[in-house]
Amino acid sequence: MSTVILLLLTGLGAAGLYFLVASGLSLVFGLADVLNFAHGLFLSVGAYAAWWAATSLPGAGSEGLGFVLTAIVGVVAAAAVAALVELVLIRPLYKRTIEQVLVTVGLSLAGVALLQVIWGADPRTFPRPAWSGGVTEIAGARVPNSSLLLLGCAAVVLVALQAFLRFTRVGLVIRAGVEDRAMVTALGIDVRKAFTLVFAIGGAAAGLAGVLAGIHFTSVTSAQGGSLLIFGFITVVIGGMGSVTGTAWAAVAVGLVQQFANYYVSGLGDIFVVALLAVVLLVRPQGLAGVAGGASA
Amino acid sequence: MTAPVPAQRTGDALLSIVDLRVRIGGSQILHGVSFDVPPTGVTVLLGRNGVGKSTTLKAVLGLTPAGAQVTGEVRFDGAVVTGLPTHQLVRRGLGYVPEDRGIFGGLTVAENLRLAERDAQPDYDTVYQLFPELAQRARQRAGTLSGGQQQMVAIARVLLNKNRLLLVDEPTKGLAPRLVTEVADVVTRVAQTVPILLVEQNLALVRRVGVDAVVLAAGEVAHTGPIGALLADEHLTRSLLGVGHHKPASSTASASPAVEKAS
């Protein structure tokens, strides 16, 4: 029983990480039709910026309020880079899908190379708070605190995103734009302003994922973003493009399937996740929450 | 090729379309369309299916699909607006009710209307007076409305703001006869305060609300003139609209669409 609870909570922790990566991807694709392969770079930027802050920025550190500042630096840096990427590289290429994909793929490669030039290819030990390395006993299961932290942060982000989309004017524009972008402009709304914001929000979530991945895996590497991005894409496809709720359910499914399969079928978690993706694509190609056909240009 | 009947030119036109040409995916949809929309009344854009009526409206608004080649000039309210982004054009006072209604199905009725608010004081009084049902269904998802109710939302969205001109594309398409009458009533009322460029195939409705007619044939303007004269001329209606004969004017506007299919 305690094993099941442990697997459940660590699986949900992994789900939290996947949700943080995938929510931004899903919104960006749903609204702007941009398949952003550079999204993993935002995660790495968040992780390295946090690492830099904890080691070099006065006031920031690895414990208490210092770590809060460390995390904020990571999130803000990733959001800023994401907004900049949209403004400088993506914006001139709207309506040119192939070029966009090439630019984001190129950026992800160049960005990782740049991180390696600055900080080297070897993993850097992440300056994480001491308590995050501990465990909490829940119903007999000794659950890593970092899993609980991932789960909690993802839940907060999910609620905040939902509230933002439901109760703000920009959120309304984003929800409408995911359905029919052209019609939003035909109501006199400059929908491209929302694109930049959605990139920044997605970048912030990815940056937070970078910080939390640093805590969870105890180190930062330049390749981390890329490998998590694959699970991010799988989560987005399973959940349905443009739906935050669908992304959350998909992340839970991916996290749990991966964790349970890894334990019971000895390390075949990733295979089972791909199998889950295949089943969803066969049975419900538009994703859990997706609408068949999707938004038109 | 030039149009058989040159477009009229008047100095006080609200919207002028000059030599509009649209090419989408290798096929030429519009071959140089030119006509004026006067600042009052309902101007009806007529023609068989596929002659480019909807494309004309979309091209004016900059809503042609990605990759479409659009040339020509559009003047609105005295200014050349060719190539202006859609949202800026709309903010100058162009209201658009698209052919497929363009409702956001996942949003509630109230959210659909809130999204359309442009003015500081959106005119909900007029909207709810014309469509009391929308107030009752404010919290219902627009995707679950009937076709007629969705059309109400689409029209309500442009009535919230003060517009200089409405572009309305086939508002009666797919609606039951009773609703066609209702839409005709609304169009008649709205036309008293704002000019409309209306694409419509229901000739009974056209006869009731229309003032001026512009007829497109194969991507060109084939005829312009008063609606009454056009509909009275059986030879013209047959050759331009493919209508063999039509019933006398019906104030209930309940006749089925006169142009059933393109030939």
Image (tube, rainbow, N blue to C red):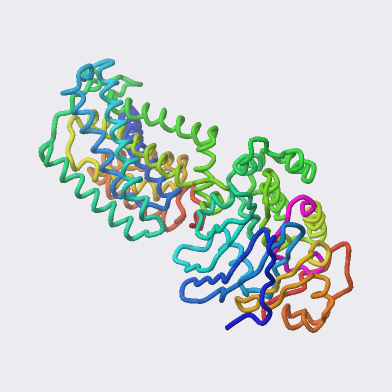
In the displayed structure, A63 sits above or below B44; it is above
Is residue A182 visible from the viewing direction of this image? yes
> Is A149 contained in the magenta span?
no
Residue sitting at the far front: B11
Q: Residue at x 76, y 70 (%)?
A: B257
B143 up-or-down from A124: above or below = below
| Image quarter hosting the C terminus of chain B | bottom right
Query: Relative to the observer, which residue lies in front, A17 or B101?
Result: B101
Residue B207 at x, y percent in the picture: 82, 67
Rendering quarter of residue B252: bottom right
Q: Is A278 on the left-hand or right-hand side of B203?
A: left
State the count of labels: 0
What segment is highlighted magenta in the picture?
A: B190-205
Q: Position of residue B43 (x, y in %)?
A: 73, 64
Residue A266 location (% of width, % of height):
23, 43
| Residue depicted at x 65% and y 78% | B217
Front residue (pair A22, A79): A79
- Across and down, in percent, residue A127 comes to 18, 24
Quick check: B189 above or below B174? above
Q: Is residue B196 magenta?
A: yes
Asked where in the image residue A96 lies, by quadrant, the reply is: bottom left
Quadrant containing the N terminus of chain B in the rendered view: bottom right
Asked if residue B170 can be seen in this view, the reply is no
Taking the spot 73% from the left edge, 83% from the top edge, the residue there is B239
